[in-house]
Amino acid sequence: MVESAVKRANTAAGNKNVYVVGGANIAQQCIKAGLLDEMRIHIAHVLLSDGILLFDELGPESIELERTKVVDSPGVTHLMFRFVK
């Protein structure tokens, strides 16, 4: 389902960069389908006790990431990774 949405977005953008924004479920679908070149994670400095775990349903295979940028600011930390293929 997410694959066709990303393909349509890519076509509509003239095969330029497409940004996918969503929660854990969308991120997991995109990672499993190999649709991402990079991933940006924004961590608020608050712990919540409920929700979907970001990397819980990816399976047993390791996914190699290269950290490209870290920005720490009051209240949030921004992490950027490139998927190593």
Image (cartoon, helix red, strand yellow):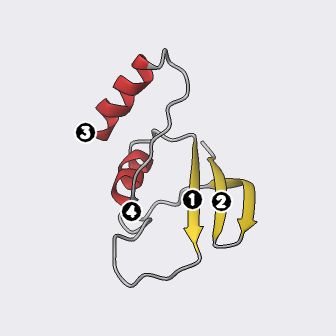
Which element is circle 1 on?
A: strand
Look at the picture and state if 44 lies above or below 27.
below
| Mark toward the viewer: 2 or 3 | 2
Residue visible at 50% across and 31% down? Answer: 18
Question: How far separated are the C-alphas under marks 3 and 4?
Answer: 19 Å
The residue under label 1 is 41
Local SS, label 4: loop
Badge 4: few (under 14), some or many (20 or more) residues near its Cα, within 10 Å? few
Q: Which mark is residue 59?
A: 4
Labels 1 & 2 near each other (Cβ < 8 A): yes
Q: Which residue is mark 2?
A: 79
Spatial separation of the CA atoms under disc 4 and disc 1: 20 Å
- In this view, the mark in front (3 or 4): 3
Cα–Cα gap, marks 3 and 1: 23 Å
The residues tagged by marks 2 and 3 sit, at their Cα atoms, a distance apart of 27 Å
Above or below 57: residue 48: below
- Amino acid type, residue under disc 2 in the picture: Leu
Which residue type carries mark 1? Ile
Q: Earlier in the sequence, mark 3 or mark 1?
A: 3
- Under circle 2, the secondary element is strand
Which one is closest to the eye, mark 2 or mark 4?
2
Residue that badge 3 annotates: 1
Camera-side residue: 33 or 21?
21
Task: Verify CB contact (< 8 Å) between mark 3 and mark 4.
Answer: no
The residue lying toward the viewer, choosing from 64 and 29, is 29
How far across and how far down the image is residue 56, in percent? 39, 69
What is the three-letter code of the residue carrying label 3?
Met
Badge 3 or badge 4: first in the primary sequence: 3
Q: Label 2 neighbourhood size at 10 Å, few (<14), some (14-19), many (20+)?
A: some
Nearest the camera: 30 or 79? Answer: 79
For mark 3, give the secondary structure.
Answer: loop
